[in-house]
Amino acid sequence: MTKTIHLHLISHASGELIEMLARNAIAQLEGVEVERRLWKMVRRLGQIPEILAAVGETRGFVLHSIAATDLREAIEEGCQHLSVPCMFSLEQMVHELSTHYDVPIQYRTSTRDVIDEDYYQRIEAMKFALSHDDGVAANDLEGADVILVGVSRATKTPTCMYLASQGVKAANVPLVPGIPLPEGVMKAESPLVVGLTLNPARLAHVRAARIRALTASEKPDYSDVDVLREELRDARRLFARKGWPVIDVTERSIEQTAAKVMNLLAKRTGAAV
């Protein structure tokens, strides 16, 4: 039985080194198919939120060649919050050389990113999204610009990460059958709350792929279309009762969903003025 491996490759240069290492590593594994995405010339902190958004969408394994400590820390901290394994490709070799020759390791400390107000806003938004992902700190949401609510696998996490790359502080809270939403969501006044929904068949496909990727036991109805149809129906009823705007993400990319959220935020701000 073939297993699909999702690889996220992040390079500070052309990506040739990281691709070569990945190909040779995968060649040692039996019965796998690889879906990979490569990011080249990653040299600015402002690029990280968008990368983490894509990582959060498919999870998988992150392999990077980023030595600059500020970028590396941002990538590895983000992956840790997303529970995604992350590895610096030269870690073992650098450590072995350092130990063998008894010389210190001196990574570059900064990417010399241009520090401006937008930069700080994006970094703060990324930190906020990571610390308020998947219902974490759900009773402390007044600092959010937007709260995304939806069933499991409705692209809430990657959309929040992409919004962070645009400087928007976004939190996401999952709808779990039989469990009420946290009071922090129901009482939120400052943030815009948006419901995300999608086609039941599409959701079943995504969840089935998630189960295969995790190779872990899930509830048998996690990807059952009939059960999901009712789950989504309950979600829409909640959105209607609360008067929250709803976005159907079935045919939308993460970027398109984020753009729709930002349009809603802009209209809300304009109405307030």
Image (tube, helix red, strand yellow):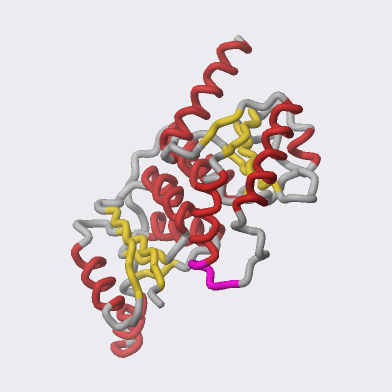
Image vertical order of residue 152 relative to residue 8, above or below: above
Picture coordinates of residue 214 (x, y %)? 53, 68
Q: Residue at x 56, y 37 (%)?
A: 169
Q: Does the magenta stretch include residue 214?
A: yes
Image vertical order of residue 20 relative to residue 164, above or below: below
Exactly how many numbered labels are in the figure? 0
Choose top left, top right, bottom left or bottom right for residue 270: top right
Image vertical order of residue 191 relative to residue 50, above or below: above
Q: Which of 48 and 216 is in front in this view?
A: 216
| Magenta-drawn stretch, dominant element (helix, strand or loop) | helix
Picture coordinates of residue 75 (x, y %)? 43, 57
Picture coordinates of residue 257 (x, y %)? 47, 34
Q: Residue at x 74, y 37 (%)?
A: 185
In this orientation, does residue 171 appear?
A: yes
**Which quadrant, please, contains the N terminus?**
bottom left
Picture coordinates of residue 152 (x, y %)? 61, 51
Q: Which of 64 and 111 is in front in this view?
A: 64
Q: Nearer the viewer, residue 245 or 91?
A: 245
In this orientation, does residue 124 appear?
A: no
Q: Give the range drawn in magenta.
A: 212-216
Choose top left, top right, bottom left or bottom right for residue 50: top left
**Which quadrant, please, contains the C terminus?**
top right
Q: Which residue is drawn at 44% across and 55% down?
A: 55
